Image (tube, helix red, strand yellow):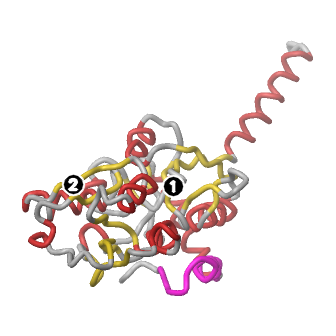
Amino acid sequence: MKKIPLGIILALMSFNVFAAGAATILKLGIDPTFPPFEYKNAQGEIVGFDVDIGKAVCAKMQRKCVFVENSFDGLIPALKARKFDAILSSLSINDERKKSIDFSAPLFTTPAYLITHKNSGLSSGADDLTGKQVGVQQGSVFETYAHKHWQNKGVNIVAYASSDQIYADLALGRLDATLDDATSATLSFLSKPQGAGFELNGEEVRDNDLFGKGTGFGLRQGDDKLKEKIDKAIAEIKADGTFSKLNKKYFTFDVSPRS
């Protein structure tokens, strides 16, 4: 039997240890500009509801979460380019996105609202918004909704890289309104001094095809093994009360997906 040099044996052992360690990592693409779902705290750490869910799912999978920052509108291209394993960034499940990526089981859903000045006299109806400037985040379901329901009615849709930029322009009067998640809008803008004169306008904006299915992990098409593992972990954190605890930590209402 041929002897294998000690150096080669040690190198192979080191490689195997490295490979085993690498296999425990789950890289998740995220745009941390959407509190309370994903944002940076005063220490520059990425935190939020999605982040806590991701960590809980990773724990069930016995994997270590690594969050990779990416602009929201570039998350799907970056996923396809294998810059990370999955997207976890309040990504709404809809048929248009399903053409290019797969999704996990639904995680949560929260209501969408038009945000306007309290004395605007506007509503979310397209006729009311004709000729108005409405800001939306690039690549979001809110941008998709605006193009689908408002653009052909003469509404000026202005896309921004982040919600912070939208709210800055709304406060300065450069926009007449924005469409956003009600929870994020309240925390990011309405509860702050610059948002004091603004409100969630009227009734919830509904589109079951865009908003009704909730959010989920975005996955590369055909990555069935990872989807199966993530779905199993999601079911486990919902069954053992972990999801409910996180829900109560961040919200005063149930964000479970609608049946």
Residue at the image point whose x is 38% and y is 74% from the top: 198
Please report the residue visible at 73 percent of the width from the left and 53 percent of the height from the top.
43
Point out residue 186 in the picture as x, y percentages from the top left corner.
47, 74
119 vs 51: above or below: below
Amino acid type at mark 2:
Ile
> Is label 2 in a helix, a strand or a loop?
strand
Question: Residue at 40% across / 42% down in the picture?
Answer: 74
Q: Nearer the viewer, mark 1 or mark 2?
A: 2
Q: Position of residue 21 (x, y in %)?
A: 75, 41
| Chain part drawn in magenta | 241-255
Please identify the quarter of the rendering in which residue 234 is found.
bottom right
Mark 1 and mark 2 lie on one chain; the one further toward the N terminus is 1
Residue 58 at x, y = what percent? Answer: 65, 59
Q: Quadrant of the N terminus?
A: top right
Quadrant where the image shows the C terminus: bottom left
Q: Nearer the viewer, residue 156 or 250?
A: 156
Residue sitting at x 11%, y 64%: 130
> Residue flagged by tag 1: what amino acid is it?
Thr
* Residue at image mark 2: 157
Q: As drawn, is 27 to the left or to the right of 80?
A: right
Disc 1 designates what residue? 33
